[in-house]
Amino acid sequence: MKNFLKTGLLALSLTAASAAFAEPVKIGMITTLSGGGAGLGVDARDGFDLAIKLAGNKDVTVVTEDDAMKPELAVQIADKMIQSEKVDILTGIIWSNLAMAVVPNAVAQGKFYLSVNAGPSPLAGAKCNENYFNVAYQNDNFHEAMGEYATQQGMKKVFIMAPNYPAGTDSLSGFKRFYKGDLAGEVYTKLGQTDYAAEIAQIRDSGADSVFFFLPGGMGIAFVKQYAQSGVDIPLMGPGFSFSQDVLGAIGDAALGAKNSGSWSHDLDNPANKTFVEEFQKAYGRLPSTYAAQAYDTANLILSAAAKADVKDADAFRAALKSADFKSVRGKFKFNTNNHPIQDLYVREVVKEGDVLTNKIIATAFTDHADAYAKDCPLK
């Protein structure tokens, strides 16, 4: 613990976070720790745990379980955590189909759910809830940024592709919302697919001037490797998930030069981010990913709220969450009326720093960007 606390305490405002809470806080983290999506969940877990460790607050307990990317298992775990473990807060889900299975039931039981990643459009719009906060984004956002960038760059005929599940459909909807050119093709693949020979053949014959794809985790690794081997010479771009730090090592140099979007990058120049990147590397021996950064912010938001209000006092705790009084690794951060972020979105390029593949920011796609579904949310 002492090693973690040597640097960056002022940047993280840990004095408040480390203060004793009125009541202990128990957090249930349901995330993906096995299978093809395990890298995403491991990074989210590690980022969340790091924030708790840095704060050094003994009033916080985190119970973590693996959902194995299975909605029915996630529901069972959530029910057990709520009914047997008596958690105050749930978090951790990576995949939107799992979030849609878990979140509505959890908030209906009066529990708070804070998303470290999944941001399905129904939960941002008509099915929003006062106890549901998304600390990451709404699913469309990163894709909207690439649609805007593609338009700015004068791309005329983009081939778009994503898995056929809620985040996949949201992703292509987001891209198309801001892309003003024509589509060379629009394909939805099977969730968990690893053979993309048919899709690559479609891309080759499409006449596209670029390819936008959203394939997180092992799906993206498989696609980019097969794409590079195919010899198709059409530039790739995607949201940050397609070229996140957790997959770049497995993809290799085939990712170099690819453009992608996100609300965070390890080279963002603010004190909280510098501390986070340094301490994450020290703790885990690798650069953090977007998933780790979002989970780290989520933990620090919970700590900041619990320092102000008793989690058992739902109204007070909700107001403390809404105020977002914490030092985000993204710099400025605030919630919209639907409890989703209003934030800047960047375009990044995959580069090599020494022997390590990573991303650097090359442009800002949006400033203070809000999601398209807040207007449908009855919260004010």
Image: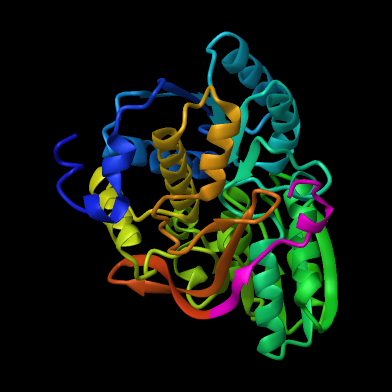
- Residue 48 x, y percent position in the rendering: 42, 39
Decide: is 293 above or below 33: below
**Residue pictured at 48% horizontal, 55% vertical:** 290
In screen coordinates, is 286 left or right of 156?
A: left
Indicate whether residue 207 is drawn in magenta: no
The span picked out in magenta is 364-380
In screen coordinates, is 376 left or right of 74?
A: right
Nearer to us in this view, 248 or 289: 289
In the picture, residue 200 is in which quadrant? bottom right
Decide: is 34 above or below 337: above
Residue 163 visible somewhere in the drawing: yes
**Residue pictured at 35% horizontal, 60% vertical:** 273
**Residue pictured at 50% horizontal, 78% vertical:** 257
- Residue 193 x, y percent position in the rendering: 71, 47
Nearer to us in this view, 242 or 314: 314
| Residue most extreme to the top | 84
Decide: is 271 above or below 307: below
**Residue pictured at 84% horizontal, 66% vertical:** 186
- Residue 227 x, y percent position in the rendering: 63, 67
User: How does the figure colour the protein chain or chains?
Assistant: rainbow
Q: In the picture, which quadrant includes the N terminus?
A: top left
Residue 190 visible somewhere in the drawing: no
| Residue most extreme to the bottom | 154
Count every numbered label the image shows and give the total.
0
- Residue 260 x, y percent position in the rendering: 57, 70
